[in-house]
Amino acid sequence: MQKNKYRIHSNVLFEIAQSRSFTEKDNIEERFDEEGKIKLLSDRAGADLSLSIVKTEDGIAYSVKWDDSEEVFKGWNMAWEEFIWCLGVVNKPLEEAAKKAAEEAKRRAAEEALLAEENAELDEAVAEEASTEESSK
């Protein structure tokens, strides 16, 4: 099972955001920071990517922030799609590097196996030659 490439900061709020709109009984007002945000998700790659709940003039919205750019969405689905797209961009170089490292390790293992086979053949030939020399004496 592959580990998520993002970190969930509040499971409860994350589940609510995915399934329905927030209501007064969810009591999220006290969770907003001084900027009027509640961070829900962030990337694990350290790329400063986050998805937050934000207060706007129209009520509650979702913000996807990456480095110095930020987009605000009224609905969860659009914010989630944007976050996942950005996450894919963030992780693509990491995935490519991991793939290259795996290919390199596989190539090295094949070379080592070939060298081991050649060494075994040489050892066998040397042993056979030594045996032949001893029997001819």
Image (cartoon, helix red, strand yellow):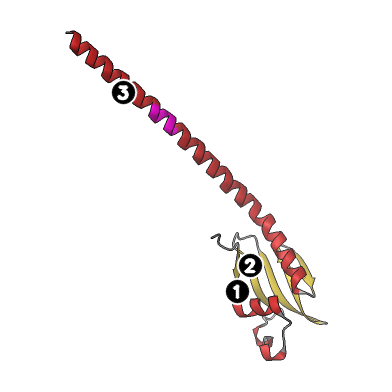
Residue in the picture at 27% in, 14% down: 129
Q: For mark 3, does the 10 Å Cα neighbourhood hold few (<14), some (14 to 19), or many (20 or more) residues?
A: few
Q: Earlier in the sequence, mark 2 or mark 1?
A: 1
Q: Are marks 2 and 1 in contact (CB under 8 Å)?
A: yes
Mark identifier at residue 78: none
Where residue 87 appears, x then y in whole percent? 67, 60
Badge 3 or badge 2: first in the primary sequence: 2
Q: Residue furthest top?
A: 137
Amino acid type of disc 3?
A: Asp
Residue annotated with mark 1? 9
Q: How many numbered marks does the figure carry? A: 3
Q: Main secondary structure of the magenta part?
A: helix
Of the residues tagged 3 and 1, which is closer to the observer? 3
Residue 97 spot, x, y in % from top left: 59, 47
Q: Given the current orientation, which residue lies at the most extreme bottom position?
A: 25
Foreground residue, 68 or 102?
102
According to the picture, the residue beneath numbered tag 2 turns out to be 42
Q: For the residue labelled by badge 1, is the local secondary structure a helix, a strand or a loop?
A: loop
Query: Which residue is disc 3 drawn over?
Result: 123
Residue kind at label 2, given as amino acid type: Ser
Q: Residue at x 83, y 82 (%)?
A: 58
53 or 103, which is in the foreground? 103
Residue drawn at (41%, 28%), measured in percent from left and top? 115
Magenta residues, as a range? 112-117
